[in-house]
Image (cartoon, grey):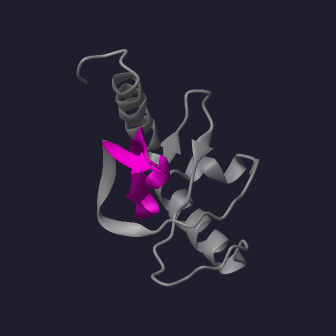
Amino acid sequence: MSQSPDGTVVVGGTYQVGDWNSKIDVKDREEILKNAFEVMPSLKIAPVIGEWVGQRPGRSEVRLELENVELNGKKIKVVHNYGHGGSGVGLSWGCAETAVGLVKRGIGCLSKI
């Protein structure tokens, strides 16, 4: 579970290797909510304001870095921020902050992070 700055609580995440289903799965929803209610029973009265399915290819570690690449003969800077697997929502706040720092560094706003 992760609480956003506006007080919304994000509940969920699954780890299903090779599952590329992009539709909401009722069994997954029930399992996610059951587990969340065990941890925080007060969520039982909270309204569900949205659901989504994301494809989260996992890696052995998150890739979060600035890279200089060449594209069509032009040198460009790319910020990589992926590989969070089923922990993407929980890691998103810190990783996004780091990615912003990398972008600023890439465009010359900062000498280092």
Residue 23 at x, y percent in the picture: 73, 74
Left-right relation of 91 to 25: left
Q: How many marks?
A: 0
Q: Residue furthest bottom?
A: 18
Of 36 and 50, the residue lying toward us: 50
Of 99 and 25, the residue lying toward us: 99
Residue 79 at x, y percent in the picture: 40, 41
Left-right relation of 59 to 41: left
Q: Residue furthest left?
A: 112
Q: Quadrant of the C terminus?
A: top left
Magenta region, main secondary structure? strand
Q: Quadrant of residue 99?
A: top left
**Residue 80 forms part of the magenta stretch:** yes
Residue 95 at x, y percent in the picture: 39, 40
Left-right relation of 78 to 47: left
Q: Residue at x 33, y 42 (%)?
A: 68
Residue 111 at x, y percent in the picture: 24, 17
Q: Quadrant of residue 12?
A: bottom right
**Residue 103 forms part of the magenta stretch:** no
Q: Residue at x 72, y 71 (%)?
A: 24
Q: Is residue 65 above or below residue 50?
A: above
Give the extent of the magenta segment.
67-89
Q: Is residue 61 above or below residue 3?
A: below
